[in-house]
Image: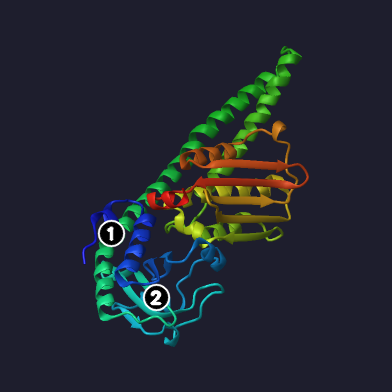
Amino acid sequence: MAITSEILVGSEDLAEILHRLAQRAQEVTGAEFAAISTLDEKGTLTRFIYTGISEEQARRLGEPPTGRGLLGELARQDRPMRMDNICDHPKYSGWPEGHPDMGAFLGVPVRAGGRAIGALYMTREAGQPPFSEVDEAAASVLALQAGVSVSYALARERSGRVYLLEERARIAHDLHDGTIQSLYALGLEFDALSSRAELPAEVRGPLKTGVERINELIADIRTYITMLEASTPIEQPNLTRDLAFIIRQIVPPSIASVVNISAAALQELTARESEDLLYIAREALSNSVRHGAPTKIAIDLRQTRDATVLTVQDNGVGFEEASTRRGLGTVTMRTRCERLGAELTIIPIPGMGTTVRIAIPRRYDEDEEETDD
């Protein structure tokens, strides 16, 4: 069985490579459902990309698997697992509500560097024929070839993550030692000028206002530095895990938080998009807690026909948009959205709360576009 280079090295994006591998696994084994996972050094499942389930079914299933039960068992194996009925395995823990009832199962570890870095999973609906030795051989060859491309893509992502962490530290250092010190010196100069007795009143007032604005800007930058230097997970971005981390870090227990994440939306996001969405969500949450006085914050990630949408909504005091100064955090959110090609919408309702909505246009392949037409 040959796999074209287009599938494995035609893209540098890990999510796209994994999606193509899941589709190929479905094709070569005649499976009705196929998936591929990636594992960290501890054997914990970090990604789960699937094919064969519609978006509507995926939305009903909610969050993707976390690697417990049979999926976790396969991560510890170095040989394929083939069963006529998955329900007979002692590690089988049942299907989530809305999941198709599966019978035949074929799982193959994806290995590189002497350890499992992921796994391929293939199933057929209950009552369908089991997988054959030929299916197992085809999936095993695919797993061997996948090990090369997946390990390469994981290495690229990890090196990129290290670069981002180093760049974040450098920016924080520059802001603290350069920008803040310059602003502080300018504020002292303005303050000294405004205290001169011979200064006309019409000049003294704007100088005092300027000092206040400088102090506000310094406070904004200090908050931004704190966000940059905050201890965040060093693994690749994972919105389910990292949003929970950010909420624990920023939102006090007195404010109720609700998180709803669609598995279909998670699957489509690249690592870079996830990274940017985490920063935007962090800024939106920080603004809500610091300025909104809410009692509840809701975070929602879902997929529409045209976009992957992250919404952060609170029930706080809101604000008057026309009379509110645009802070550094808002500028940063807009900059990240521009880089993503995303649309940022901020809807404040005085006395009722604020909604921040980020919509990333979806990517369609040629077949999907033809079908939609």
The one of 112 and 293 positioned closer to us in this rendering: 112
Give me the residue at 46% from left, 53% from top.
269
Bin the neighbour count of mark 1 within 10 Å (Cα to Cα): few under 14, some 14-19, many 20 and up: many
Separation of marks 2 and 1 at Cα, in angstroms: 23 Å
Which mark is on residue 123?
Answer: 2
| Horizontal arrangement in the rendering, residue 226 relative to residue 317 (left or right) | left
Residue appearing at x 35%, y 68% in the figure: 26
Horizontal and vertical percent for residue 373? 46, 48
Q: Quadrant of residue 84?
A: bottom left
Q: Provide the residue designation for mark 1.
A: 149
Give the residue drawn at x 66%, y 33%. Answer: 325
Image vertical order of residue 231 relative to residue 99, above or below: above
Furthest residue toward right: 351
Q: Position of residue 151 (x, y in %)?
A: 30, 61
For the N terminus, the image quarter is bottom left
Q: Image quadrant of residue 347?
A: top right
| Amino acid type of the residue tagged 1 in the rendering | Ser
Residue occupying the point 64% across, 22% down: 190
Q: Eyeballing the image, is 3 above or below 346?
A: below
Precedes in sequence: disc 2 or disc 1? 2
Q: Give x and y (percent) for residue 160.
A: 36, 50
Is 127 rendered above or below residue 221?
below
Instruction: In the rendered structure, find residue 253 and report the number of the disc placed on it.
Output: none
Amino acid type assigned to the residue bearing label 2 in the image: Thr
